[in-house]
Each structure stands twice: as C-alpha cells, then as structure tokens.
Amino acid sequence: MYEKYEHHGEEVTVRSDFKGKHRKHCLCFDCDVFKGDDPVMKCSIAEAVFKNCVKFNIVTPVWECRYFQQKETK
C-alpha cells in the first residue's frame, strides 16, 4: 500500500496508488497563469508551493485557486 523512493534527493514514503499522479490532480497544470519554465510568466503561488514542497520534501497538489484560468483546448 505504501512505498519508499527518492524525491528531491531524500527518501520519502508515498501511497502506491498516488505515486506519479500529482500532475493529473494539480490545478496548476491546466492553468493558463502557470507557465512552467518561463520565469517572466511563472505563477508566484505555484512557485511558493513548489519551494515549500522542496523545503519539506512533500508533494502538494493545488485543488483550489482564485486566480485559475483554464487553458484553451486545442
């Protein structure tokens, strides 16, 4: 049910059925405000959440955000 693996250089524990599903559940990856690697357009909230995740070696999907703007589908 749980497994250990290395994440951000540290061993962590994850529920096996959740491992690797962060992007599927995180609102940021469907948001037009979040631009990933573009430092000019990067979302400051997503950046702060990511820094917190690295600091505490956790994974935090964002499920609610007042600034969410859905990407247009192509």
Image (cartoon, grey):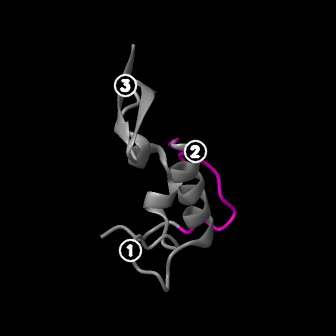
How many numbered marks are there?
A: 3
Mark toward the start of the polypeptide (3 vs 1): 3
Numbered badge on residue 56? 2
The quadrant in which residue 19 appears is top left
As measured in the structure, the alpha-carbon distance from the residue carrying label 3 to the one carrying label 2 is 16 Å
In percent of width and height, residue 48 lies at: 61, 63
Nearer the observer, 7 or 17? 7
Q: Looking at the magenta stretch, what is its main secondary structure?
A: loop
As measured in the structure, the alpha-carbon distance from the residue carrying label 1 to the one carrying label 2 is 22 Å
The quadrant in which residue 10 appears is top left
In percent of width and height, residue 38 lies at: 41, 80
Q: Quadrant of the C terminus?
A: bottom left
Nearer the observer, 9 or 45? 9
Residue drawn at (54%, 49%) of the image:
53
Q: Amino acid at mark 1?
A: Asp
Q: Amino acid at mark 3?
A: Lys
Badges 3 and 2: C-beta atoms under 8 Å apart?
A: no
Q: Taking the image as drawn, is residue 22 in sight?
A: yes
Q: Residue furthest bottom?
A: 40
The residue wearing badge 3 is 4
Q: Amino acid at mark 2?
A: Phe
Secondary structure under the numbered disc 1 in the rendered image: loop
Is 74 part of what is drawn in magenta? no
Mark toward the start of the polypeptide (3 vs 2): 3
Query: Crowdedness of circle 1 by 10 Å Cα count: few (<14), some, many (20+)?
Result: few
